[in-house]
Image: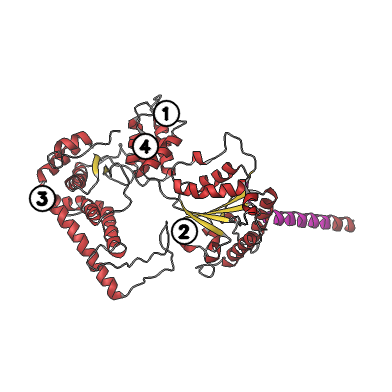
Amino acid sequence: MQFSIFALIALFIIRRLGDINSRSISFGNSRAKAYDEVNAKDKVTFEDVAGNQEAKQELTEVVDFLKRPEEYVKMGAKIPRGALLIGAPGNGKTLMAKAIAGEANVPFFFVSGSEFVEMFVGVGAGRVRDLFRKAKKKAPCVIFIDEIDAVGRQRGAGLGGGNDEREQTLNQILVEMDGFEANTSVIVIGATNRPDVLDPALLRPGRFDRQITVTAPDKSEREKILSVHGKNKKLKKNVDLGIIAKRTAGFSGADLANVLNEAAILTVREKKKEIDNEALREAVEKVVLGPSLKTKVITDEQKKLTAYHEAGHALVSTVLPEANTVQKITIIPRGKAGGYTFSDQGDTDPITRKKSQFMADIAVLFGGYTVEKLIFGEVTTGASNDLAKATEIARNMVNRYGMSDLGPVSFDDSKGLSFLGKDMVEGKQYSEESAKLIDTEIQKILQQGFQTCQAIIKKHMKELKAIAETLIEQEVLEFEEFNAITKHINPNLKESKI
């Protein structure tokens, strides 16, 4: 009897150990998603990636390496082992990597950098080995590591624990890339929005040979992206995607897709058959500021304050020729904003900007603050975001662009391309005396912008009151009505008809 009980206990322990062992083995397996055979319907090619023509041209070479590796070998050329896609989130880095595999018609392995790193030392390295082992069996193929900075940060610069596991994982990636046989036809594509924090060993020749920047789309590219995402949407015939592209400066590809999706949702909610201009306009504003809060109770005093605040922005923007053209003003709350003034910057996105344009931006931002001070005698918290933006512009003018009396000098602390801000361990690269001079110049620029704004408000007080009172009555002021009040100030304004 005792022997039977002992045998049962021993059998139970052996089975448990077997389960633990099998789980630990699977724990070290790669979690990469493999796309071996993609349906023609789901296949992604460069035609599906609108914009970023220069990046696509660079990546066309990578596709050719995968399609015709033997020709490069005959010529004595070494096929690049990796390419690094650099850019802000939402601009199509993942889509481009899929398009490479789609164009070359080869398997595609997708994995996030964060999936390699676990609390147990050695797991990440095991997953890397497993991923590359699978990829070599499927060669030619593409391995795509998204957010590679999660595992590829510079070694020895960590601020917390867990660095041993991350560094071992990074070392294994380097070993695997170095261990490729000559012209193995496995291309590793990495994606990051923080190239400044990557370990230099990742970027040396023989690893990520190509570094390709994926930028935010310009106006013509935004129109193409909207056309791609609008293919499966029921758009009214009078919808002009070019006008939407004009109104969405600074939007990423993901933002533009979201605009069309929000417009489609709104159209269904309102039981309409097709997406119209009104739905698109509402969708753009929702993506920028959040949903409108039409049911929110606002006091008459708050309504008046918001109307005059927004009228100040719009008036200054109209007077200054370097400022953007006002298209709409509203005092209906949306998201965290009590009201807003919507403007566009014209038919083309500027590649460079002049000092006069920055000064105009600062003066426009001071519009609400100045009106509150002149009309109501005190300022409110409503101007806080405007002041922060104005100060940031002035700081960049001094620190980065040499647009101050300090002359042609840069105090920019940023290193390389950074899309999400500076590294936590970075410090100032200039003296306290220089810092005081910088602060003085920033104050001078801000004061100049404030004085310009104040002079405009005082000179055009009649128009300011007309704009504000119309807003109080109607809550929304479109271009035609706004232009009727201000056309004698600037007769050259043009409407973006949407």
Q: Check disc 4 and give the amino acid type.
A: Ala
- Name the residue that disc number 2 marks: 194
Query: Can you tell which of label 2 and label 3 is closer to the viewer?
Result: 2
Q: Check disc 2 and give the amino acid type.
A: Arg
Q: Residues within 10 Å of mark 1 (few under 14, many from 20)?
A: few
The segment highlighted magenta reads 8-33
Residue 225 location in percent, x, y? 43, 39
- Name the residue that disc number 3 marks: 458
Q: Looking at the image, is mark 1 or mark 4 earlier in the sequence?
A: 1
Name the residue at 69% across, 54% down: 133
Q: Nearer the viewer, residue 282 or 209?
A: 209
Q: Check disc 1 and give the amino acid type.
A: Val
**In the rendered structure, are the residues bearing label 3 and label 4 in contact, judged by CB atoms less than 8 Å apart?**
no
Q: Looking at the image, is mark 1 or mark 2 earlier in the sequence?
A: 2
Q: Residues within 10 Å of mark 2 (few under 14, many from 20)?
A: many
Indicate the secondary structure of the residue bearing disc 1: helix
Indicate the secondary structure of the residue bearing disc 3: helix
Query: Can you tell which of label 1 and label 4 is closer to the viewer?
Result: 4
Q: Looking at the image, is mark 3 or mark 4 earlier in the sequence?
A: 4
Spatial separation of the CA atoms under disc 3 and disc 4: 36 Å
Quadrant of the image occupied by residue 387:
bottom left
- Name the residue that disc number 4 marks: 283
Quadrant of the image occupied by residue 439:
bottom left
Residue 14 covered by magenta stretch: yes
Query: Can you tell which of label 1 and label 3 is closer to the viewer?
Result: 3
Indicate the secondary structure of the residue bearing disc 4: helix
Name the residue at 48% across, 41% down: 49
Q: What numbered label is drawn on residue 339?
A: none
